[in-house]
Each structure stands twice: as structure tokens, then as C-alpha cells.
Image (tube, coloured by chain):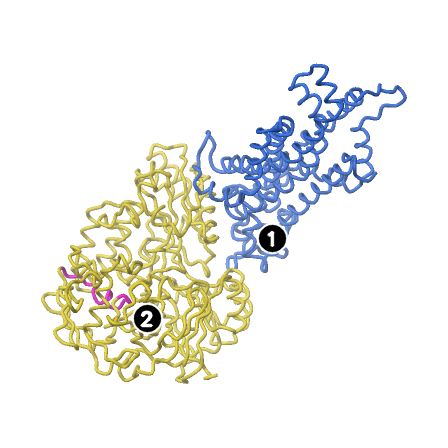
Chain colours: A blue, B yellow
Amino acid sequence: MTAPLHEPTAEAAPSAIEEAAAVGGNAKPVQGRSLGRIAWERLKRDRLALTGGAVILALTLIALLAPVISNLVGQDPDAYHEDMIDALFGTPKGSLGGINGDHLLGVEPVNGRDIFARILYGARISLLVGFLSALVAVVLGTVFGILAGFFGGWVDAAISRVMDGLLAFPQLLFIIALVSVMPSDMLGMTGSSVRVFVMILVIGFFGWPYIGRVVRGQTLSLREREYVEAARSLGAGRFHILFKELLPNLVAPIVVYTTMMIPTNILTEAALSFLGVGVKPPTASWGQMLSNAIDYYDSDPTYMVVPGVAIFITVLAFNLFGDGVRDALDPKGSR
Amino acid sequence: MTTQRTSGRRKQALAAAALVAGLLATAACGSSGGGKTSDAGYDAAGNKVVNAGTTKGGTLKFAGTQDGDSWDTTRSYYGFAWNFMRYYSRQLVTYKTEPGKSGAALQPDLATDMGKVSDGGKTYTFTLRDGISWEDGKPITSKDVKYGIERQWAQDVLSGGPVYLKDILDPNGEYQGPYQDESADKLGLKAVETPDDKTIVFHLPQVNSDFPQMLAMPSASPVRQDKDTKSKYGLHPFSSGPYKFESYEPGKSLELVRNTQWKDTSDPVRKAYPDTVSVKFFSNANDMDQRLIAGDYDLDLSQSGMSPQGRQTALKQHKGNLDNPLSGYVRYAVFPQNVKPFDNEHCRKAVIHGADHLSLQTARGGPVAGGDIGTNMLPPTVPGTEGREYDPFALAGADKNGNIAKAKEELIACGKPDGFGTTIAVRNNKPVEVATAQSLQASLKKIGVDAQIDQYDGSQTSGIVGSPSNVEKKGYGIIIDGWAADFPSVQGFGRPLWDSKYILESGNNNYALIKDEAIDELFDAYAKELDEGSKGRIARQINHKVMEGAYYLPFTYEKYLNWRSSRLTNVYMTDAYNGYDFISLGLKSSK
């Protein structure tokens, strides 16, 4: 899952050397510190960003290993434990929402499902939607942004207007409306898979203009640089210029925006599940848990705190890491 | 015909006293927490009067989270609105102001007696009392009563209310309604005669033993023709009762003040203790419950139970201010026969046996806030009920956690030994509904039935689950719903659900699409039967036919926790409305 984050940075290294060569200066044999390497060294000094990165890594592992971990603690996320519930109030027996040796984070009110197991499984939905919708947005945004910036003219005008339109579009309302008219089975998927699929597509689709604008702006300035001129005068084709000359230099802003976009997408997924148009029951989702917890904010605060903290930690980790990556890659940033 | 609790139809409980006692005992066992019994005591107003008193004056303060569907007597289908309408409307006959079961019995109101029945039950003649008057002092005449009833025919303008009288008096739809009536006095309905201002005669084309019940609905209230503002009438109904509208802001507040023209000598029912009756609407149920507990308001207008939050605080700290009545609702799952494999009764039985009934009860709120496990489809509030004695699937007995072995046998008999996939349709506006669906989904998984949950917009019920073709298209094999009687009889409860004549293209309530001639004939026989004992026997037969067909999986006979402030006098639950009898409430002090 972390691959998309690291690959571009890794790719940036050789391309940066090429760029240096292209700009004209012969690569000096003294010491070749690539931009990627410089960035990585800066990032290494940023403890907050590293912590964020470590948390992201841990969350990703947790999400991938959710079935294994929940098996280890012996809890099925969908199993009912009604013996844990006080029949009069519908809240968990015992203090702190029924936390005990079996149920590490307590149980849900009414049905007694294990919150720990549901948080693990909920991480899968959050990260899946967060990463994949960001991926959709990055791919679309990069392609359209670079096309708009490079070709200019009517291509730029058309793409820019589309982006303006999308940015003005009420995304949440659109998804709510879409979900209510959507069939419950499509493309061989049923239930929650359909919802997850649609959420990824829609969040990604509405997210691309943010990246698209940045990429377009960068492309506009980069295409006038000397190295592009040089490539052009040497007879390089459009595609060569686009993908070999321009794209590598766009990697930095793209990576920065991606790390910033993932937490936003996770929050959007939580909001959608909160509103009841996210995943379908019984699939666990943090937003849905939070939404259910509202009725018990006083009588069983643990139920609200746990998914809330999970979302908080995840979003904070992504934001810290994203900030660190930006500081490390942004040439104008403080050094 | 919404079936959500708060938007409930009028419900009636005719629970046998023994059964009520049994329920109370269960409730007492379940409430181990205890708490202060500061007031009259827990569940004290269930079947007796709490704080009897005759002090007049003061402001009775209702709080609600939902405004009435309409305050027009013709247009409302909400149970609490029918209860509230007695403040400003009178009927020929109405319910006795007595606690519990006797509160569901009828007594004369505008009429001097219960009507003279002749022509073998086809003609009812009523004489009006002396001294009955409108809020401007003019006397209420039999023509006003007839005009008020005629408004039921104007469904194009005044939709929303019950139309029993229209169906019974004019089954072929010959009358066009008062707004298209070409006669000068707009009283062209032939089935009702008004020979003079004091007499009104009803001619029924066919005998219907529940006719007086239909006259007790607010939709049979008098309306004066010169005060009829048609679709706007609900904003300011013209009062025939002890209170009249002072101000009304829909969704915000409502205030009634005394109608000085009303004379208590003309009204054997209404005591009219408070000087003012006010209603404040809240957008947040938790907020409202806190204000109730704090003593800022006296009772919940919608009589639908406290939110989980308020319930917990109230049970722990103010248990003596709570009652735990039956709501009159049966909560259940129903299996539409036009969705495969639910056309096969064995597959329906598999689901009934496979469900964990105790888990469903917990999902609905447990024995106190949810209700007892329902064992058949005739709730303990309808005459003819056998209550939980009749339990053909052992839902509350041996198999209360489900019987997987029996379910598997039925699956084999159905030709689906490995189970099947289906969809549960559930309204999305109440967490308890979704919790119920999830519980059912979890227990059905154990017998190999893979159920998806589809949450639909609760306000669109009639077009979504009320449309058999849509149900088939969406594959809703299981619909989660609930139902309460419009009036206390098997006809008022079950006819829209089980009679094949009531299957509709849209707004259908016979979700199971039951087409059983035996059931239809039993309903016809019931309508003609005037003997109470025989009526009960027919009700039981209908119930047994429905259960034997395995069209329904009952969850609970719903109960709820109802708040009464310590300021109130003459508090009791009436089975007529399955809530406190609003019209009798007074205040301890006139301040």
C-alpha cells in the first residue's frame, strides 16, 4: 500500500541526475547528491514526519493483517455478544464500554460486536478508499494537468473550465444522490463492494482538479525552461518531452498533494459512512461507528471515542507526513 | 399509513388485565438499577389514575420532536394528533376518559346516546345534545357533522387522513365530495340524512360491526362550512371543544387557550383543567428529553418513548416519572411472495426458524424499551388476541435463539439446501430499524442465507416497499416494518395487511401479497358479525391463517418508556391512544 508513496520519490533520483545533465552542467565527479537524496536527508531530520510515516506504515500493516490480528485475539468483527449487553439500557455491561481481556476496546451497544476487531476492519475501508481514490485523482489530475499546461490554447481552456466546474460541484450531495439511485449489484459486485467502488471513483473523480491545477501551473512554467527548449531543438517528440522531460520534474508537487489528499479522502469516506451512504452493514467503518455512537455519547462514551481517535490518529499521521514531504521536496521551503 | 412509531396511526390496547400485570412484572425484573421513586412510582399510570385532582388553571406544556401531520381533523393519521384533537374537536361518540382497557370503550359525546341501530345494523340514528356550540357561540348542528364527514370525500384537496367512513358509506365512490357538490347546501351525500338540526341518520349499504369506531375518529368531527378554509384548515381549525387555537407556527410552537363558548354541562368527557395548552417542537430528541427531565416541559407530545440517552438518565434518576406501556405496534419482518424464493412457504419458514428472536428483541431495545418477543401477528391490544399463548413457531419459547436444525430442514424442503441470497429492506431514519435488520442478517448468515441490507428513505415508503413491482425489481425478500390498529378490531388492524382486496399498485400495505380466499371470507364474515364473542373467534381464526401461511416473522409487541412530569394531575394511559389521555390532564398548581 505504501508503494505509490515511495516509488515516485525513488524515481525522482535518477531523473534528477538526467535533468542536471540536460541543463548543461556536466555531472561533476566530486559528489553527486541527487534532489531525491537531499529530500530524503531532509525528511530524515524531521522527526514529526518520520513518526507520521511510521504510523502510516503501522496502519497499513494493521489493515492488511486485520483478519490475522482479529483471529489472534479471537474476535470476529461481525459476531454478536449480547451477553455483554445490559438489556435495560442496551449499553455494554461493565465500565468503559465493556473493556476487558477479551474485548480490548469494549463492545458496541445493543449487539455487543467487538470494537477492536471492527476498528481493525474499519482501517481497511478507510485506507483502501483513501489510497485508491487518491490514486484515481493523481492519475487523472496529472494527465489532464500536464496536457492543459503543455498544449495550452483550446485544450487548456477546455480542461481548465472542466476543472473549475468540478471544483464548484457539491461533491457530498452528488454522492448521496448517486448512492440512492445506484443498483445494489453491478459488475459482479454486491453490497459493500459496490459502495466502496463507487466511493473510490467519485471521490477520486472530484479530487483530480486539485492536482490538475497544480500540475498545469507547474507545466506552464517548466515548458519554457531551457532544457525543454534544448530537447525540442534536438528534435524530441511531444511524448518524450511530456513524459521524459516534464513529468519527472512534476513528481515533487504530485507527491506532496497526494499525501495531503489521502487524509481528506479518509475524512470524506468517514463522512459518507456517517451519513449512511458509505459501506453497508455489517461491514465495519469508522464513520459508521461514529454515527451509531451519537445515541450513546453520554451512556457509552468509549464507543464514540475509539473510532474518533482512530480517525484522528490516521489523519494526523498523514498530515504530518505530508507536511514533512512537502518541506523536504519544496525547493522554496526553508532549509 | 406510515408505520413508524412517532408517525403512528391511532392504536388501541385492549390488553387483558392479567397480561398487563404479567408485562409489568417482567419490566420490574428487568430494572435492577433501581433509582429514586420520587413521584407516584414506576409504571403507576399504566392502568390507574395518578395524582387525581380537580385544580383548574396553569399552562400544560407539551414538548415534541415532530409536528402533527396536520391539525385538520380530516387530514391527520398520527395517533398523538388524534389524541390531541380532542382539545378542540368533538365527535358524535368518543372514548371514555378512563385508564387502561376501559379507556378504549366508546361513549356518547355530541350525541345523547350511542345511536339507535335499526334495519338489521344498516341504519344508525343519533340525536345531538343541547348546549353544544362552536367557538363563536353558534350551536353545532347535525349539518355541521355531516359536512365534516363529507370532507373525507375531498381526497384531492384534503389527503392524509383515514377514509373508513368514505369506504363504508359510499363503496362505489358515487359522491364527489363537498367541494364539487352541486347542491346548494353542499350536503349531497345520500347515505347521511339530516332531517333536522338535532338529528343525523346514517344508512350503510352493508352492515359493518365497527361503524361506531369509525365515528369516534377525529375525521368524523363537525366542520362548519363557512369556516372551512380547505387545505389551510389545519393551520387554524375552528373549535368545537374546550380549547381553541391561539397561535400556531408549524414545526415551532402551538398554543391553545380556553374556548369560552364551550360549556362543561354539554360535555360528559372533557374536564379542561389547564387554562392554556402549549406545544414546543424540538429538532433534537436528546435535547427534548433533557428538558423534560429538567421539568421545563410536562410530557412528550408524540408519546413515542424517550431517546436512548434520556431513557438511561430517566431510568437511573427519575424512575418514578416513567411508565412503560404497550405502543399497540407489532414489529415484524414480512416476506413478499413475488420475490423468489419467498414464493415457497418452506423458505419463509426457514427464515422464521433461523432468526434469533432474543437478539432481535435486544436490537429493538430489550424487554423494557423494545417490548416482549412477539409470537403471532395479532397484538395484545386487539380484541380476540391470544397474546403470547399462541406461539406456533416457539418464538418466545424453546426456539427463542433460533432453531438452526429446523431452519435447515425447511431449506431442504424448499429446494435450497445451501441457503440463498436475498435483500432486507429497512427504513433508514431510525437506528433501531437498522439494528434490527443487522441482527436478522447476522442470524440468517448461520443458516446460509446471505442477506444484503438496503436502507430506503422512510418518507418514501408508499412508492418503495408499497409498490409490489418495485419490491420485485429490487428483490426485497424481507421487509422490516411495523403496524398498529386504526381502531381496536382485527378489521382495523389486519384488513389492509392481509385482505387480497387491499393489494394496491402503490401505497400497498399487503406487502406479503396474501391472496387467501379463506382470509378474505373471514374478514367479510367479521364485518357482518355483531356478537362480540363471535368477533373474537373470527379474529383468532384470521390470525391463525396468517401465521400458518408463514408470511410474517413477528419481532416484538412494542413497548416504550413514557415521561410524565411531577406537576401533572389525572395522569393515566388510555388504550384508546396507547398514550396518556391528554384531555384529562391537569396541573397541581395553577401557576
| Quadrant in the picture for residue B387 | bottom left
> Seen in the image, is B240 located left or right of residue A21?
left
Viewer-closest of B43 and B277? B277
Measured Cα–Cα span from mark 1 to mark 2: 46 Å
Disc 1 on helix, strand or loop?
A: helix
Q: Is residue B329 left or right of residue A136?
A: left
Q: Residues within 10 Å of mark 1 (few under 14, many from 20)?
A: many
In the image: residue B145, left or right of residue A141: left
Q: Secondary structure at mark 2?
A: loop
Residue B578 in picture, x, y percent from top left: 36, 66
The boundaries of the magenta stretch are B206-219
Q: Nearer the viewer, residue A268 or B28?
A: A268
- Magenta stretch holds residue B212: yes
Q: Position of residue B235 (x, y in %)?
A: 36, 67
Per the image, the residue denoted by label 2 is: B237
Numbered circles on residues, count: 2
